Image (cartoon, rainbow, N blue to C red):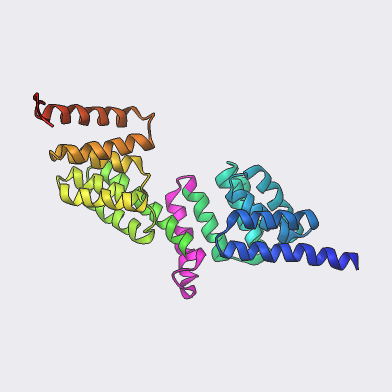
């Protein structure tokens, strides 16, 4: 009877945690998973659930221990293997070990989209863009029937976006800004929630002297990530160059709020304020 009650306890906490995850209540989910783990630390699904949330919260060391326990206890948990590999490679700096876990997972499960995409993320993290693209495209192709909102498809698209963004950066550095724009457009289409391609698009348009298009791109980058100090900074410099000093000051001050220790941002904001004072008419006695 006591064993049945304990089973019901951890299972109920696990189910409650999964429900909280679906609702986007991550802290609440972690609390439920922690209770489930205390009740049944030997259950692989519980170790995996808690390990994944620890990783989401940035506690990679504890996450690794939990994920190893889940993977060693039950290698049928494909997600445990993929998440462990991500933890090892992206958060613990042990890339070779991460790939070894993926090799082991493929031996158990065959080639799976989730494993392809995880491997693509590892290659992208190591800046091995060619192999990152190969794995991500394979993951994207094998999830074609799953719909655009499938998490594995979204992850594959995010990797491909980073590949295209990197290509655009290389093209821009080589002076081919027109070609870079096409690469940045592909990147932003693949991952609309990522601001970097819009920021880089703005820089490419600015280099081509297309100020209006540059302004639009910087504003898109800010719309995606309002805390992007570089986007505010670049837009501020562009506005200053266009003679829109008041708007430039506002943007550069915002950039300094987000990155107060950046000397270039601080210098840009100070320069804009100095220019604004020079442009302002002198105040006379009796002016209100």
Q: Position of residue 153 (x, y in %)?
A: 47, 65
Q: Which residues are the magenta region?
A: 125-153
Q: Residue at x 32, y 49 (%)?
A: 222
Q: Is residue 158 visible?
A: yes
From what the image shows, is residue 188 above or below residue 250? below
Q: Quadrant of the N terminus?
A: bottom right
From what the image shows, is residue 187 above or below residue 62? below
Q: Is residue 103 visible?
A: no
Residue 233 or 275: which is nearer the viewer?
A: 275
Q: Residue lying farthest bottom?
A: 145
Is 223 part of what is drawn in magenta? Answer: no
What secondary structure predominates along the stretch shown in magenta?
Answer: helix
Q: Quadrant of the C terminus?
A: top left
- Compared across the picture, whether 77 is left or right of 143 comes to right
Q: Residue lying farthest top?
A: 285
Q: Position of residue 39 (x, y in %)?
A: 80, 57
Q: Quadrant of residue 119?
A: bottom right
Is 129 part of what is drawn in magenta? Answer: yes
Q: How many marks?
A: 0
- Compared across the picture, whether 10 is left or right of 234 comes to right
Q: Residue at x 51, y 64 (%)?
A: 152
- Compared across the picture, whether 205 is left or right of 23 comes to left
Q: Quadrant of residue 29?
A: bottom right
Q: Residue at x 79, y 63 (%)?
A: 9
Residue 146 or 5: which is nearer the viewer?
A: 5
Q: Quadrant of residue 158?
A: bottom left
Q: Residue at x 58, y 41 (%)?
A: 93
Q: Position of residue 223 (x, y in %)?
A: 32, 53
- Compared across the picture, whether 100 is left or right of 12 comes to left
Q: Position of residue 150 (x, y in %)?
A: 49, 68
């Amino acid at each position: 009877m006591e064993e049945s009650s304990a089973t019901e306890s951890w299972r109920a906490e696990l189910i409650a945690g999964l429900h909280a995850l679906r609702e986007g209540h991550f802290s609440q989910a972690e609390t439920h998973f922690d209770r489930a783990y205390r009740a049944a630390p030997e259950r692989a699904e519980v170790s995996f659930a808690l390990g994944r949330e620890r990783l989401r919260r940035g506690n990679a060391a504890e996450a690794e221990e939990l994920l190893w326990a889940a993977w060693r206890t039950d290698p049928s948990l494909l997600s445990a293997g993929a998440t462990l590999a991500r933890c090892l490679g992206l958060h613990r700096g042990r890339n070779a070990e991460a790939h070894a876990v993926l090799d082991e997972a493929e031996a158990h499960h065959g080639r799976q989209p989730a494993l392809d995409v995880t491997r693509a993320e590892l290659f992208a993290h190591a800046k091995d863009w060619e192999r990152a693209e190969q794995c991500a495209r394979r993951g994207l192709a094998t999830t074609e029937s799953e719909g655009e909102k499938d998490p594995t498809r979204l992850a594959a698209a995010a990797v491909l976006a980073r590949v295209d963004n990197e290509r655009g950066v290389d093209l821009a550095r080589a002076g081919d800004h027109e070609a870079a724009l096409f690469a940045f457009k592909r990147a932003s289409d693949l991952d609309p929630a990522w601001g970097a391609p819009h920021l880089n698009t703005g820089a490419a348009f600015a280099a081509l002297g297309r100020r209006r298009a540059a302004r639009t791109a910087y504003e898109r980058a800010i719309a995606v990530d309002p805390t992007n100090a570089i986007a505010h900074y670049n837009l501020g410099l562009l506005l200053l160059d266009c003679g829109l000093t008041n708007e430039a000051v506002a943007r550069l001050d915002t950039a300094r709020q987000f990155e107060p220790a950046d000397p270039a941002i601080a210098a840009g904001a100070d320069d804009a304020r100095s220019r604004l004072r020079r442009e302002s008419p002198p105040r006379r006695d009796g002016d209100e």
